[in-house]
């Protein structure tokens, strides 16, 4: 048995391939031999395959005799699956992996959508329409996908965190979803017309990731970056941000602007940058509490700390005249859209 998109796994009585091979879209993962593979620590693999049932985790770590009903082929396939998840876990910032693994549902509920200007940007700047193909890197639960689908372009979603990918697939079963990271996308060269990173690029703003996204772009293709940033000129929004930001640790943030340090980037020229106002309307639990708790580094905190943050947010709502007792509130955002065109072949 071989799992979809997993590397080929050779048994003990088979010769190892002379050269590493790739299976489907997973580049740089070689054929693995049971006899010579050094599996990572149990704790590390567990972090990367939390969704695998306990019995299968045991199989992945070599305790096969307890489950004689499963064949050796199944055991080997699950070992490969665990190994791949460990690789992805190691490539993703710990706050993103841990936080988004536990907060996928809250993320889908608490995050704002995007302003109408974003649709114009996709059509007029990224030139998306029927017959084009767009890749979203770090697609999360699919919050930006409705706008991409609305453009008429063919859509591919890339997401490294299993819990987010599961939520995305549940909401958008028609979208082709890949597991991978920004610096190992696993698509052929020059295979898409645009690459979009919505609320994500700050996690992987490295020369390696930019070069990999350029690799999959066709000549003249466009890299588009978009973020919703809270408008902290509003006092209660600034107070909400202060509650959240004190826990950020070493997590990369859009607000710091450090993502700009990779530009100008080799093989890209700046095409466009614009801003639009975006209003997130809903009940306070959704707009403030769920939004804050869906923040990666908040979701990764121990339960007691998350409870304390929730208490502080509810006190903010109670003590703020614009929020207290209201069934519906508006959280203002400033949406940044930036685009870079691929130059050369």
Image (cartoon, helix red, strand yellow):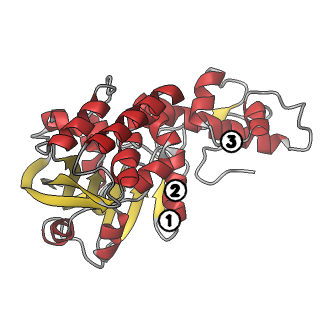
What residue would you read off at disc 3?
Answer: 52
Where residue 90 sits in the image (x, y, percent)? 47, 29
Where residue 111 sits in the image (x, y, percent)? 35, 53
Rendered image quadrant of residue 21: top right
Determine the secondary structure under disc 2. Answer: helix
- The crowding category of the residue bearing disc 2, from other C-alpha atoms within 10 Å (few below 14, some 14 to 19, many at least 20), is some
In the image, is 23 to the left or to the right of 125? Answer: right
User: Vertical placement of 291 versus 49: above or below?
Assistant: below
- The crowding category of the residue bearing disc 3, from other C-alpha atoms within 10 Å (few below 14, some 14 to 19, many at least 20), is some
What residue would you read off at disc 1?
Answer: 171
Q: Real-space Cα distance between discs 1 and 2?
A: 6 Å
User: Where residue 167 is drawn, which disc sits there?
Assistant: 2
Q: Is residue 18 visible?
A: no
Say which of 252 and 186 sits in front. Answer: 252
Q: Real-space Cα distance between discs 2 and 3?
A: 16 Å
User: Where residue 275 is drawn, which disc sits there?
Assistant: none
Where residue 345 sits in the image (x, y, percent)? 18, 55
Determine the secondary structure under disc 3. Answer: loop
Q: Residue at point 43% right, 56% down?
A: 109
Where residue 276 sits in the image (x, y, percent)? 12, 59
Looking at the image, do the residues carrying marks 1 and 2 touch, with CB atoms under 8 Å apart? yes
User: Vertical placement of 234 versus 310: above or below?
Assistant: below
Front: mark 2 or 3? 2
């Amino acid at each position: 048995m071989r799992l979809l998109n997993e590397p080929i796994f050779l048994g003990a009585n088979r010769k190892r391939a002379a050269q590493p091979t790739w299976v489907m879209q997973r580049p740089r993962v070689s054929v693995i031999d049971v006899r010579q593979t050094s599996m990572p620590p149990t704790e590390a693999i567990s972090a990367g395959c939390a969704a695998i049932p306990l019995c299968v985790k045991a199989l992945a770590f070599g305790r096969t005799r307890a489950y004689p009903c499963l064949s050796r082929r199944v055991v080997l396939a699950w070992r490969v699956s665990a190994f791949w998840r460990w690789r992805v876990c190691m490539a993703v910032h710990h706050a993103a992996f841990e936080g988004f693994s536990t907060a996928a549902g809250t993320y889908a509920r608490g995050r704002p959508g995007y302003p109408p200007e974003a649709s114009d940007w996709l059509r007029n700047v990224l030139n998306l329409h029927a017959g084009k193909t767009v890749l979203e890197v770090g697609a999360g639960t699919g919050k930006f996908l409705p706008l991409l689908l609305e453009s008429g372009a063919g859509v591919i979603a890339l997401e490294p965190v299993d819990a987010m990918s599961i939520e995305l697939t549940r909401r958008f079963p028609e979208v082709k979803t890949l597991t991978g990271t920004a610096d190992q996308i696993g698509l052929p060269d020059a295979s898409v017309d645009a690459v979009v990173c919505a609320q994500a690029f700050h996690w992987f703003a490295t020369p390696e990731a930019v070069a990999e996204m350029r690799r999959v772009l066709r000549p003249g293709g466009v890299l588009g970056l978009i973020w919703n940033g809270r408008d902290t000129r509003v006092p209660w929004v600034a107070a909400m941000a202060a509650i959240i930001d004190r826990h950020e640790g070493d997590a990369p943030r859009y607000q710091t602007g450090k993502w700009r340090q990779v530009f100008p980037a080799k093989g890209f020229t700046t095409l466009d940058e614009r801003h639009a106002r975006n209003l997130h309307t809903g009940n306070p639990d959704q707009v403030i509490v769920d939004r804050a708790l869906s923040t990666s580094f908040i979701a990764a905190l121990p339960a007691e700390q998350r409870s304390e943050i929730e208490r502080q947010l509810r006190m903010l709502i109670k003590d703020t005249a614009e929020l207290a007792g209201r069934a519906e509130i508006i959280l203002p955002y400033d949406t940044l859209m930036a685009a870079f065109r691929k130059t050369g072949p």
